[in-house]
Image (cartoon, rainbow, N blue to C red):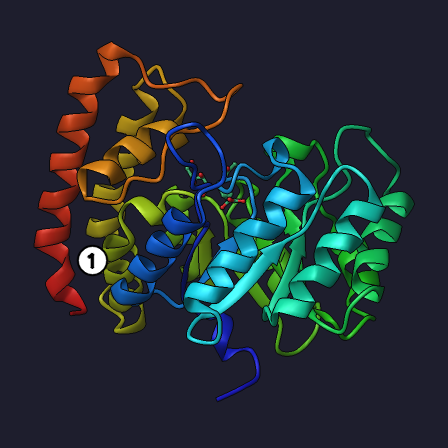
Amino acid sequence: MTKLDKYKGVIPAFYACYDDEGNISPERIQMLAKHYLEVGVKGLYVGGSSGECIYQTVEERKLVLENVMEAVGGKMTIIAHVAAPSTQQSIELAQHAESLGVDALAAIPPIYFRLPEAAIAAYWNDIMDSTDLDFIVYNIPGTTGYALTPTLLKQLVKNDKVIGVKNSSMPVQDIYLFKNNIKDDFIVFNGPDEQFVGGRVMGADGGIGGTYGAMPELFLAADHAIRHNNMDLAREIQYRINDIIFSFFECEGNMYDVIKLILAKRDLNIGRARKPLQPATEADRAKIDAIAANINAAVAQYKPVYA
Ligand SMILES: CC(=O)N[C@@H]([C@@H](O)[C@H](O)[C@H](O)CO)[C@@H](O)CC(=O)C(=O)O
């Protein structure tokens, strides 16, 4: 058992939970967090893209984390994503997260301006210096426009607080770059859910993903198959997961709104996605019924793999 084992496994990116008026709902946050605790995932990644962080105020983001911690803090690994438009706001969120007792912080690079690498490093270092928590560098070039380099990562890991990278770039080989020759005992999380198995084979220790929350049982089953060296089964589950993810993208509404409507069918009503994320349309409704049925069938088929 090492200090980093608590991060190795399936970690859903926690969804934004709103009431019917679109305000943060403490009750729904606690309900969803307890649901994932019961399902048996390793931890939760709170306040990331899937948490709609960029559409929430600092105070709203604090309220979200407070309710997750009240519901499950201490019983699962909690990683708080704290990147915000300014360094000052990011530090405020980081220190608030530390006061609640989270396990680790994560942050994307600075938002909006394409800043030079020195400014990106300074941003991450400022956040790290503001608390004693473990820190996870978040590489998501598809949305931020900045692709983490091994050179910068080697500089960052001189700070012992850096324990890993959440890698949401598409090339699986990036996992090799961030896993090898960086430092001993370093965690890499697979980001693209469509490549969960591929990322793990390349060396990722676990995954953090935006679709895990819609079908955590399938990722737990794939994780179990990988750990037991049953790669044919792992691939089979990954293919099933991908069919489901690709069906999300066939809807006109944004994936998070589609997932929320699917969760509502499982008695997990967490409201709708915030605009400008597009709401699901009437035409999506029949597709959403079919996707929900497909998820239920896949869960029934593959949950016995680990349960
Ligand atoms: C670009 C993007 O949003 N990537 C997602 C994936 O989990 C993604 O939703 C999934 O692979 C479906 O394409 C995560 O890496 C991001 C994430 O988990 C988060 O920050 O909430």
Q: Is residue 276 above or below residue 183?
A: above
Q: Foreground: 186 or 296?
A: 296
Quarter in which the C terminus is drawn = bottom left
Q: Is residue 197 visible?
A: no
Left or right placement of residue 164 versus residue 39 in this view = right
On screen, 6 above or below 236?
Answer: below
Label 1: few (<14), some (14–19) or many (≥20) C-alpha neighbours in 10 Å: few
Q: Position of residue 136 (x, y in %)?
A: 65, 61
In the displayed structure image, the side of residue 200 where residue 243 appears, left or right: left
Q: Residue furthest bottom?
A: 1
Tell which of 283 and 211 is nearer to you. 283
Q: Would you identify the image quadrant in which residue 54 lies? A: top right
- The residue that label 1 is drawn on is 232
Residue sitting at x 46%, y 29%: 22
Q: Residue 77 at x, y = what percent?
A: 49, 70
Q: Is residue 47 visible?
A: yes
Q: Specify the quadrant of the image occupied by residue 166.
A: bottom right
The image shows residue 143 at horizontal and vertical percentages of: 62, 32
| Residue at 33 percent of width and 61 percent of height | 34
The answer to whether residue 204 is above or below residue 260 is: below
Q: Quadrant of residue 159?
A: bottom right
Q: Residue at x 44, y 48 (%)?
A: 209
Three-letter code for the amino acid on which mark 1 is drawn: Asp
Q: Ligand 1 closer than 8 Å to the CB at disc 1?
A: no
Q: Whole-percent x and y of residue 184?
A: 66, 78
Instruction: Answer left or right for 260 relative to 236.
Output: right
Callout 1 secondary element? helix
Q: How many marks are shown on the rendered structure?
A: 1
